[in-house]
Image (cartoon, rainbow, N blue to C red):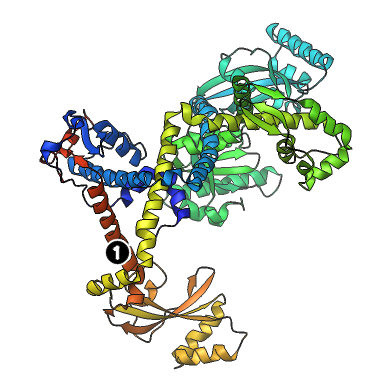
Amino acid sequence: MMTRKVFYRLLPTFVLAVLLWAGCSGARETTREAALPPQARDSSVVAILDGEPITVSEIERRYRRSLGGNSSAVPDSAELRDFLDRYLNFRLKVKAAEDAGIGDLPEIQEEIDTYRLQLARPYMLEQEVLEPIIREVYTRSQDMVDASHILIRVAPDAPPADTLEAYNMIRALIDSVKAGVDFGELALRYSEDPSASREGPGYKGRLGFFTAGQMVAPFEDAAYNTPVGQVSDIVRTRFGYHILYVHDRRPAIPDIEVAHIMIIPRGPTGADTAAALEQIEELRRRFENGEDFRALAREYSMDHNTREQGGRLGIMTFNNPVIPPEFRDAAFAIENPGEISDVVQSRFGFHLIYLIDRKERKPFEEAYEDLKTQVMRLPRTEQAQRAFARQARARYGVTVDTAQVRAVLDAFPADTIIAHLAVNDFDALFEDTTFATIGDAGYTLSDFFAFAKTQRLERNRPLEPQLMAALDAFLDDRALDYEAMRLQERDEEFRTLMEEFRDGLLLFRVMEDSVWNAASRDSVGLRAYFDAHAEAYRFPDRTRLIGFYSRDDSLLADVAARLDAGATVADIQALVASDSTLTLRIDTTLVAGPTNSVYDEALSLQAGDHTDVLAYRNGHVLLVHDGIEPARPKTFEEARSEVVTAYQEVLEQRLLERLRQRYALYVFPERLEQAFAGHATATAPAGDSPTG
């Protein structure tokens, strides 16, 4: 039986699940053609349920949604008729629940409101905030940019005088570049990025190639919008003021997967270097003569982090600044998987690089989830969410009485406020009087302080600006909730999701009351069903396996030796019972056939034989073939779970028969031939109208 918890987990893909549960019997009607309602004259109507028409376009839409929106799937006529039958069965059950008033029950309304709040906000933020950034990152990541920069640091909240001084400095540097002074030399002398003055990535401001999502948003915007060979306008980030010089822009190079062998000279002399070079050249010749690269790496590579994995370095990205440029260039120059580079020298030693695979750029839909994970960590995402919240605040209007917050600051020492917040009892000190509103929603100081205790206020900083920043964040947070609760009014997709959730609750209640629980409770009906179908419930021939389980493989080796010497399973059981220090578990398992598990190791043995000691989960197992348990009928208790499932299907069919008698149902399946116009579909012979 499906539990409520499992059912709710399936609700985001509800239509598919519902239509799979709805039963396979065809929806039928018995009304004569003379009594057809007026809607039947409309050729786009494929069914009428209690006076409500169901159109071809609705069936198309529901079918698409049941497949997760796969627009390429086109069913044949038989498949679409079967879908229509199952969909009508689903609608019959929901209709019965609505007429019974289940949708108006307080607990159902509460579950709908809770689900709406849980779903609406992340759904809204993904649609309004995340997806535009994901699309931009995906589009930009088709190219990579090679740029240098100069940074003059200034804090975001710096005094105006400091900000102006930094701006004038970066302005003067732009003038110097335009006057012909070398950008790298200016970066070396003036850039306040520490990497600009030391060898390695960033030296003289040269960042090398990077792509979307690797830099803060304003910096990335400038890099992608500045033509090659030119200097950007001044850029302000949270680090300060920047100017960029763009050296190159080219299509992004897909990632590769590589392995390598590294030989390090054993000393500083020229002879040591020559010996290392000779050794790696010899390894290159051995590979070209057919020896396995992974085996050579395991035996000879001096990179102890990769040698046990056959030299495998994993996925390599072209613009990874950690990779030595000479190593990177040689690796990406290898044309075909299975080939190696020439010998490459880096600061680490000599290398042979083996190309395992070239990765292809994924289509947007396939890359979406990985990009989503990346984007959610970017500062620009938090900034975009904050901007979206501010738009909501402006749209609905905000009032706030900051005097009430300052009155609290005046009434309590700062340490006392922070202490109360830490133990979660500060909000209890206030009456529930409204101090802020968004639209028609009001919020109390209790609401605010419950939120403020999540903001990690610091004792060693002035409290008032921290509390006012927390108030601003509180209003943003509540504005997002306020917007989310109105999402259903303006977003058709979300409205459909909520309708499906509501229908799901109604269906669940009908199935729970009339089928699932009813079957479990009807002991007389279950027994009668079992007696009528007893021949269907049988055990086949089964192999009886005795399993000895222990973390200690030496203990199981001792058990095997005892069995080989003539001890019985009963002897081993007696030994375990007499010695509490033996960590040995003994179980009997009946296996009807191959299971793709460790038990398969014993199925081919003769009765009385045992397996070797086998690895099993976090320990080991020894299995003894203890003979064949012959086929026999199951008792009612042994078959009960299967009987309950089968009897549920019987009760479901009875429910559907009752509902068909209660509601007038007309079905015109031949009209489904109009579905998915423009696509080729296999057709079945047209039926009469109305039909069953």
| Residue sitting farthest toward the top | 179
Position of the N terminus by quadrant = bottom left
Label 1 sits on residue: 646
As drawn, 137 above or below 187 = below
Give me the residue at 68% from left, 7% from top.
178
Give me the residue at 87% from left, 37% from top.
414
Question: In the figure, is residue 263 to the left or right of 366?
Answer: right
Q: Residue 476's image quarter?
A: top right
Secondary structure under tag 1 reads helix
Residue nearest the observer in this picture, 130 or 272: 130
Question: In the figure, is residue 61 to the left or right of 143?
Answer: left
Give me the residue at 88% from left, 32% from top.
410
Image label count? 1
Q: Amino acid at mark 1?
A: Ala
Q: Residue 31 location in percent, x, y?
A: 15, 43
Q: Residue 256 location in percent, x, y?
A: 49, 39
Residue nearest the observer in this picture, 616 or 412: 412
As drawn, 245 above or below 56 = above
Q: Residue 445 location in percent, x, y?
A: 74, 35
- Report whether residue 334 is seen: no
